[in-house]
Image (spheres, grey):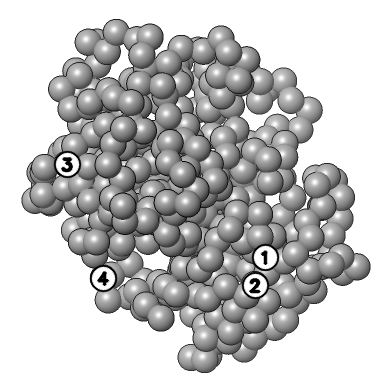
Amino acid sequence: MEPIDIVLGAQFGDEGKGRIVNYLCASGKYEVCARFNGSDNAGHTVILGGDKFAFNQVPIGAFHGMRCVIARGCMVDLERLDAEIERVEQAIQIHQCSDNWSLYIDSRCHVKTQAHCDRDIQEEKERDKPIGTTLSGNGPAYSDKHARVNQRICDIDLSIYPNISRKAMIVDASLLDYSHCLVEGAHGIMLDIDSGTYPYATSSACTPAAACHSIGVSPKSVGRVIGVAKIYVTRVGAGAFVTEIQDTKLASKIREIGGEYGVNTKRSRRIGWLDLPALAYAVRVSGIEELALCKVDILSHLENVAICTGYNNIAFGYVPAKNEEYEEVEPIYKSIKWNSSGPMRVVDLIEKFIKVPVTIISSGINKGDIMIR
Ligand code: IMP
Ligand code: MG
């Protein structure tokens, strides 16, 4: 079997995974595209014929005529998936993509309902310090799963969901052929339930190991593990953010140019400088072997860019477990004059500090704006 390649977020989500997965799918190298975690709390944006399209639960391979798989570690919101299939089909028609994509959903996937959403909203209201969840019910649904009181797809009569009934094949997805498979992760390592900034985290695992676990393949079948990072960092919701830019004018400027608003929730994303210690941590705990660096063009309107190369009094690559402690950490910055050689200086810094190669650089939304190294 051909190795399975995995694309993951290396920060707090919204790194540009959609862009990278879409690019890799277009290469023609892959036949299968699988999702392994999360629910419609995730939003993956791709540009199709100049229009923005937001995927939530359907794998991006749908736009490339691929076999798409929603693996058993995903939390499926059937009502929203039903609507999303229709949106995907409309976009495929409008933009004349190949329409021979297929959709397989693992019968063991757990199901998220409106009651989970209502609980998410209520629990957020009752928290002294709200997490800033997407209010999509993701946390309560995973709680019910782990409490072993939740329903799975195999328990549901799907006939009330016309698009799912028509389009999806409900299967034991571990039996599928994963040759030439690209796996797209949702969220990012810093939101992972175990390694992320708990409790300001999502409720699923976001690592390549979790991908194997969810799809039902051996860890030995993994090929490339590509982490995606932006040249700056964003975060939506509460939780430690060591390199957050306190200068609101500067943060707004980057937010506006970078379009840093939540795909689903439309919330303003918090903005910060690239955090190399956190990135080193994410790479270490997940096994990322190469990086795709995104949104390099966004900083071109700045004169100087800061890169965090260490935390005061803390060994490089160590991240405090306790949120309050992490929030107290002091970043050490290297300032870089932002001229034409700025981006490559950052790439050099990443490779020097993180010790994985930057193999993909994206500096715009067009096809030609991706550089492979
Ligand atoms: P939940 O996953 O909706 O419970 O939200 C938990 C935390 O993860 C919150 O800080 C959310 O903003 C964040 N989060 C969840 N999904 C995404 C995503 O796809 N991109 C960015 N942040 C996310
Ligand atoms: Mg997103």
Q: Which residue is mark 4?
A: 367
Residues 146 and 76: in front is 146
* Amino acid type assigned to the residue bearing label 1 in the image: Ala
Give the residue drawn at x 68%, y 35%: 131
> What whole-number distance in Å separates the C-alpha atoms at marks 1 and 4?
29 Å
Going from N to C along the chain, the mark reached first, 2 or 1, is 1
Going from N to C along the chain, the mark reached first, 1 or 3, is 3
Residues 324 and 194: in front is 194
Give the residue drawn at x 42%, y 51%: 221
Q: Please say if 344 is above or below 55.
A: below
Dot 3 falls on a residue whose secondary structure is loop
Dot 2 falls on a residue whose secondary structure is helix
Q: Residues within 10 Å of mark 2 (few under 14, many from 20)?
A: many
Q: Which residue is mark 1?
A: 280
Q: Residues within 10 Å of mark 3 (few under 14, many from 20)?
A: some
Labels 3 & 2 near each other (Cβ < 8 A): no
Which of labels 1 and 4 is toward the front? 1
